[in-house]
């Protein structure tokens, strides 16, 4: 079994409320948490309105499958979230 961790820091320029922050992040937990091979949580920047940090953990039998899952997550977030990915870090275990 292989495990990969993807942490994304997302800038949300102009965000003025916690409600707007949640709307702009578009339900990441619900969208990605449905996949049994992925765990997701908001892991940082909880007190800031103009930024958000999310961590995704993917598990698969082979490393290429884990890398594909993490790439798919990152690509989908860049296309669908009303914000800009400022930093993306990956760790393979």
Image (cartoon, grey):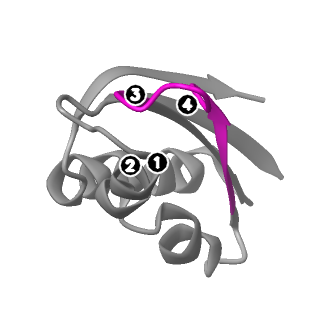
**Residues shaded magenta:** 39-51
Residue 47 on the magenta span: yes
Which of the two discs, 1 and 4, sits closer to the camera?
1
Distance of label 1 from label 4 (alpha carbons): 21 Å
The answer for how far apart the CA atoms under marks 2 and 4 are is 18 Å
Say which of marks 2 and 1 sits in front.
1
Please give the residue where the numbered disc 4 appears in the rendered image.
7
Secondary structure of the residue carrying tag 4 is strand
Q: Going by the image, does 60 lie left or right of 73? A: right
Vertical side of 26 occupied by 53: above or below:
above
Residue 65 in picture, x, y percent from top left: 54, 56
Q: Earlier in the sequence, mark 2 or mark 4?
A: 4
Disc 1 residue crowd, few under 14, some 14–19, many 20+, Cα 10 Å: some
At horizontal 30% and vertical 52% (from top left) the residue drawn is 77
Residue at numbered disc 2: 21
Residues under numbered marks 2 and 1 in contact, where contact means CB atoms less than 8 Å apart:
yes
Please name whichever residue, 73 or 62, is drawn nearer the observer in this view of the structure.
73
Looking at the image, which is closer to me, 20 or 68?
Answer: 20
């Amino acid at each position: 079994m292989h495990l990969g961790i993807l942490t994304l820091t997302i800038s949300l320029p102009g965000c003025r409320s916690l409600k707007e922050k949640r709307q702009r992040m578009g339900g990441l937990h619900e969208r990605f948490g449905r996949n049994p091979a992925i765990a997701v949580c908001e892991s940082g920047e909880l007190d800031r309105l103009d930024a958000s940090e999310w961590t995704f953990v993917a598990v698969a039998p082979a490393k290429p499958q884990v890398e594909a899952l993490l790439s798919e997550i990152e690509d989908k977030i860049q296309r669908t979230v009303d914000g800009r990915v400022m930093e993306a870090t990956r760790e393979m275990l």
